[in-house]
Image (cartoon, rainbow, N blue to C red):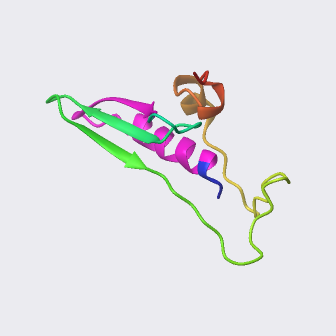
Amino acid sequence: MRIVRAMDLVHTLLSASVHPDIESVTYYDEVGVNSPAGIQVNMTDGTNVRLRVVGGCGPGGDNFSQPENIPYPYYQTPEEVNENVPSLRTIRRR
């Protein structure tokens, strides 16, 4: 699973959890990073948790010039979740 899809998955799961202590879930940036650095979970008590998603592959691993090869079965997120949660792909980068 490539990083963009992993971040979308974690963001979707946290947003859809409707946990009473979670106020919001957002992507966050850091200076010098061209894409989002991770996911920030803002809690109702004012604290926040930052999750960084990292990835890697072994020798001869993934060819990033090609589309991601998603093995069968690929379970899609239900549409009702997709309608309410912004995708990393739809957020405008600065």
Q: Could you tell me which quadrant the N terminus lies in?
A: bottom right
| Image x and y of residue 29, in percent | 46, 33
Q: Could you tell me which quadrant the C terminus lies in?
A: top right
| Image x and y of residue 78, in percent | 61, 38
Task: Indicate yes or no whether the magenta region holds residue 19.
Answer: yes
Give the quarter of the image for residue 57.
Answer: bottom right
Extreme-left residue of the structure? 45
Q: Is residue 9 above or below residue 81?
A: below
Give the quarter of the image for residue 39.
Answer: top left
Give the quarter of the image for residue 43.
Answer: top left
Q: In this view, does 75 lie to the left or right of 36?
A: right
| Residue at (33% x, 43% y) in the render | 50
| Residue at (46% x, 34% y) in the render | 31
Give 59 or 11, whichever is nearer the viewer.
59
Q: Is residue 24 above or below residue 75?
A: above
| Residue at (83% x, 51% y) in the render | 67
Extreme-front residue of the structure? 32
Q: In this view, does 13 lie above or below 87?
A: below
Give 82 or 25, whichever is nearer the viewer.
25
| Image x and y of residue 16, in percent | 43, 36
Q: In this view, does 70 lie to the left or right of 21?
A: right
Give 23 or 36, whichever is nearer the viewer.
36
Extreme-right residue of the structure? 66
Q: What stretch is highlighted in magenta?
A: 4-29
The number of callouts visible is 0
Give 49 or 24, whichever is nearer the viewer.
49
| Image x and y of residue 90, in percent | 64, 25
Extreme-bottom residue of the structure? 59
